[in-house]
Amino acid sequence: MQIADRKAATAAYKERKSVAGIYAFRCEASGQSWVGRAPDLATIENRLRFTLRHGNHRQRSLQAAWNALGPEAFQFEALERLEDEDIVYVRDRVLKERLAHWQATLSAEML
């Protein structure tokens, strides 16, 4: 990769629009679900799987299920996207409210 190409790729990454939202991480084998909120839905699945692979996820029930059943038993799903909210404190409040809604709806644990 040329230096100019690398700079252009870096600039494009920094300027991309992140989409906040609510997601579910489900275990098909056990029927368990976990829900969480993220400021960038495009990156959260990779972060989740990375911490689980290394055995240091803070949600113990999720880590235990991952260790017992393996990565192929889990599905990631974006439940709700919040694309239009630019004000951080408003976005955080809305995400918190929607997370509580999805936790109750799915009878899921919080991430």
Image (cartoon, rainbow, N blue to C red):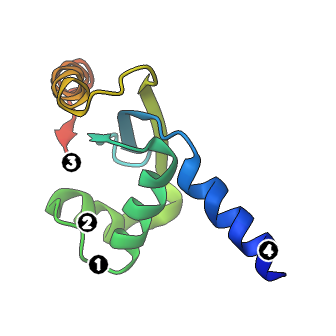
Q: Which mark is residue 66?
A: none
- The secondary element bearing badge 3 is classed as loop
Give the residue displayed 17% in from the left and 30% down from the top.
Answer: 89
Q: Is residue 34 visible?
A: no
User: Which residue is the extreme one toward the right?
Assistant: 2
Q: Which mark is residue 4?
A: 4
Give the residue displayed 42% in from the left and 52% down from the top.
Answer: 44
Q: Nearer the viewer, mark 2 or mark 3?
A: 3
Instruction: Tell me: residue 1, above or below residue 38.
Output: below
Query: What's the distance in space between the residues labelled 2 and 4, CA to CA?
Result: 42 Å
**Mark 1 packing: few (<14 Cα in 10 Å), some, or many (20+)?**
some
| Contact, mark 1 vs mark 2 (Cβ under 8 Å) | yes
Tell me where residue 79 appears, x and y as whole percent: 42, 27
Q: Nearer the viewer, mark 3 or mark 1?
A: 3
- The secondary element bearing badge 2 is classed as helix
Tell me where residue 71 appears, x and y as whole percent: 48, 64
Q: Looking at the image, is mark 1 or mark 2 earlier in the sequence?
A: 1
What residue did someone put label 3 on?
A: 111
Q: Looking at the image, is mark 4 or mark 1 earlier in the sequence?
A: 4
Identity, as a three-letter code, of the amino acid under mark 4: Ala
Q: Which mark is residue 55?
A: 1
Q: Looking at the image, is mark 2 or mark 4 earlier in the sequence?
A: 4
What residue did someone put label 2 on?
A: 63
The front one of 105 and 6 is 6
Identity, as a three-letter code, of the amino acid under mark 1: Gly
